[in-house]
Image: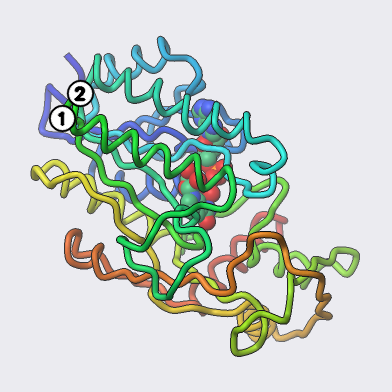
Amino acid sequence: MSKSQDTDTKSVLVVGGAGYVGSHACKAFAEQDWRVTVYDNLSTGHRDAVRWGELITGDLADESALRRVVASNRPNVVAHFAALTSVGDSVRDPGAYYRNNVTGTLNLLQAIRTEGPCPLIFSSTAAVYGDPEQTPIVEDHPKRPINPYGHSKLMVEQILADNDAAYGLRYVALRYFNAAGADPDGEIGERHDPETHLIPLVLRAARDPNFSFSIFGNDFATPDGTCVRDFVHVSDLARAHVAAADYLLMGGASTAMNLGSGCGASVLEIIAGIEQALGRSMPKHFGPRRAGDPPALVAGADKAKELLGWNTMYSLPTIIASAAAWERKARGG
Ligand SMILES: NC(=O)c1ccc[n+]([C@@H]2O[C@H](COP(=O)([O-])OP(=O)(O)OC[C@H]3O[C@@H](n4cnc5c(N)ncnc54)[C@H](O)[C@@H]3O)[C@@H](O)[C@H]2O)c1
């Protein structure tokens, strides 16, 4: 009998828990006394980011390993973060994205159905909306992804809905906007390689004169011409997963919801915020627009408030300060 059956301790299997958002979620679950088990192939995750539970190294492609992990852990909830996440790579190699993100999730669902069963929390994305017709974007906005990454996530949302209808497997799909920042205690943070996210790129450019990055376009129909995005602190995202798990355990119906702050910040505003935080300015290099970059992506976040009682706790200056502190720590500064 598993520990979760022995005691009242709730147990979560965090697939992809060695990655950026997943590791913060592990901390949030552990802080609420959940027992955490991580399943991760460490392709983009980090062994030393698994600090709040056991790490089982394995791949989504290995359905029998997934079955064993679900059977031996008997989780109350599975939180599924594991995916390939680069929009650009997904355009260059869509097969890898559909295999990992869609086929891999089918394997996980099969294991949950046969060995669990238990509800699932899925890391979805604002990329399911594509080029939005209006912002803030609410959940019933048309879903028209414009790259294979977004398609792979929307396909999984459809698969989840079909699985619920057929097998009663309940789920919450959380559509994150731009995850940013680092654990306020400095224990974990963002470590993508290569890094494509704005805040770590700007922080690196601020300290390394030999490193520069391009701002993709300054002729968008936005107040300063650069793209506007909704940055949400990774620890706020993490807390939403615990709230979603509690919602599902209380019998909540399957649903999908946005996770964002509801406020947009432009690329130039982010750079200005970092310049202010670090007390130095940096050169700005403008390049052409990137294919498929919508001018503005801002979440309508009322649904998460209503269903999960979730609100963001951390503001943009805190996001920047925590990311800067983590960046300093990661390079031993
Ligand atoms: N970071 C963001 O801004 C953002 C925004 C929207 C959605 N998301 C989604 O959130 C999730 C987490 O994103 P992240 O930024 O933490 O990415 P990440 O790359 O840091 O984490 C993904 C984790 O999944 C693991 N993984 C990948 N493929 C696997 C496989 N086949 N088998 C086992 N483990 C595997 C990786 O090793 C890694 O630890 C992803 O599903 C992503 O699509 C992220």
Is 225 on the left-hand or right-hand side of 154? right
Q: Give residue 72's quadrant in the image.
A: top left
Picture mark count:
2
Is 188 on the left-hand or right-hand side of 176? right
* Badge 2 element: loop
Report how far apart the C-alphas of labels 2 and 1 lie in the structure: 9 Å
Q: Is residue 126 above or below residue 112?
A: below
Residue 47 can be seen, yes or no: no
Residue 178 place in picture, x, y as percent: 51, 62
Q: Is residue 195 above or below residue 305?
A: above
Q: Amino acid at mark 1?
A: Gly
- In the rendered image, the quadrant that contains the N terminus is top left
Q: Is residue 194 above or below residue 205?
A: above
Q: Residues within 10 Å of mark 2 (few under 14, many from 20)?
A: many
Q: Is residue 208 above or below residue 188?
A: below
Residue 245 place in picture, x, y as percent: 22, 45
Q: Amino acid at mark 2?
A: Pro
- In the rendered image, the quadrant that contains the C terminus is bottom right
Q: Give the labeled residue for mark 1.
A: 168
Is 24 on the left-hand or right-hand side of 218? left
Q: Give the labeled residue for mark 2.
A: 117
